[in-house]
Image (cartoon, rainbow, N blue to C red):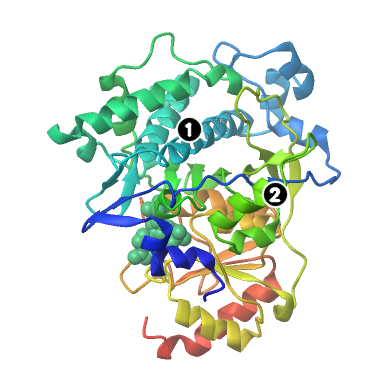
Amino acid sequence: MPLYCSNMAIKLPHSLGLRRYSKNKFTTTPYHIGSFFMFFHQKKRTQNLSEHIGFVSKFNQSFLSSTMEDQENMGLSARESSQTEPYSNELDVAVRAVQMACSLCEGVQNGLISKSGEEVRSKDDNSPVTVADWSVQATVSWVLSQSFGSSNVSIVAEEDVQTLSKADASGLLDAVVETVNKCLVEAPRFGLKGPEMPLGTSEVLEAISRCNSNGGHTGRFWALDPVDGTLGFVRGDQYAIALALIEDGEVALGVLGCPNYPMRKEWLSYHHRYHRIVSKLTPPTSESWDKGCVIYARRGSGKAWMQPLVHVNKKLVWPNSARLVRVSSIDNPSLATFCEPVEKSNSSHSFTAGLAHSVGLRKQPLRVYSMVKYATIARGDAEIFMKFARAGYKEKIWDHAAGVVIIQEAGGVVTDARGRRLDFSKGIYLEGLDRGIIASAGAILHDQIIRAVDASWDSSGL
Ligand SMILES: Nc1ncnc2c1ncn2[C@@H]1O[C@H](COP(=O)(O)O)[C@@H](OP(=O)(O)O)[C@H]1O
Ligand SMILES: [Mg+2]
């Protein structure tokens, strides 16, 4: 039996309740989609709250529905903080928007338990996509436009409206509109102002289709992956909401929502069904955080932060128990853990196994869906992330931007296999990427991996 239980969903789909109902479509059963009720104890790490407060500012009082409580916690007025820290306002809104998106996704993932498959459709590239993808894209797009003015907001994002606009997709479109409005009505809980009236179908479609930027090397744009790791999402496993701001080709800030991130890192390698059992055996205490987190960083700050999700009926009050995260200090390969995609079609497991052997990585790889792998490195729960896609596959910027800046600010290193920084200035793809992506907790491990790639590349078959 494989150690990586996530793989069981691929090897034994029927046993987990996942079945294909046509060539490229997935449906789910209650047995398959289990919500994670993973609970964890809050670590008593010290943190410099004033530093955090300094860059996560409250801004645009006409848009944010602030409270006295918020303002006390922020410690600084919007004007003061936005003058001292670049991108403070943008980070503030981005974190709140991703928190909302996490809440939306949790609702849809839980809803998959009882739905027949209407929520899971195929995109042209045959990957599953759900109501959550379009709804998050619409919600985040709407929030950013309201916050900064639609003429100032340019977004590169994964989804388009083609499938949604088809005549036979009216049920799906209705579900998206309903989901978006259900989410936006909660905006005040997240310190944001929602619409005065529910959005209509055309407004939702417009919010989605507004995300049609192609990026580039000048100016400012957002990169959004509304549900990264869609396969993990429909399997009830790990997925992420990724939002980054890119200016003049450089990632200025990144936010990663990881709604199913377990607080115990060992649980990352367990199958989601296991968590359901564990959570029933160990219900949460009043001091415990629930599962999930939002991680974020601003370029040049030298810090990456993590805060818990804002759960039902709770209000986001800065700094929302945020704590600093830092990469692991392990630089001995025999003690290090590397993570990689669950799907071997997305990254060669045999090549990374060879690298692991030659570098002396002894531990089993941690196979995790989505950009949660970047979060894993930033939090110090693993030391290396490697992705070597098949020849010809072009990595997209929204799959990496947020994770890269978070790891770098948490003290880690992210490059291609030649040791070069990833280039976010060439449009929607990471053009010029040499062979694969390597993220590490530090330079020692990083250099070892790069040398090992060079030594074994010619026989890799990639
Ligand atoms: N053939 C392929 N090779 C490499 N990456 C791929 C791929 N097909 C899809 N991906 C990317 O891998 C992401 C999932 O990451 P992971 O494999 O680490 O879970 C997908 O994001 P989406 O799920 O948002 O489409 C997609 O962008
Ligand atoms: Mg993605």
- Residue drawn at point x = 36 percent, y = 49 percent: 28
Helix, strand or loop under label 1: helix
Are there few (<14), some (14-19), or many (20+) residues within 10 Å of tag 2?
A: few
What is the x, y in percent for residue 73?
77, 23
Given residues 453 and 68, the one toward you in this image is: 68
Q: Is residue 369 above or below residue 111?
A: below
> Can residue 341 be seen from the camera position used here?
no
Residue at far left of view: 167
Q: Residue at x 83, y 39 (%)?
A: 48
The secondary element bearing badge 2 is classed as: helix
Please determine whether, in this image, residue 323 is positioned above or below residue 272. above
**Quarter residue 72 falls in:** top right
Q: CA distance from mark 2 to mark 1?
A: 27 Å
In the rendered structure, which amino acid carries the disc numbered 1? Leu
Q: Quadrant of residue 210?
A: top left
The quadrant the C terminus occupies is bottom left
Residue picked out by circle 1: 104
Q: Is residue 370 left or right of residue 377?
A: left
Which residue appears farthest toward the top when viewing the image?
196
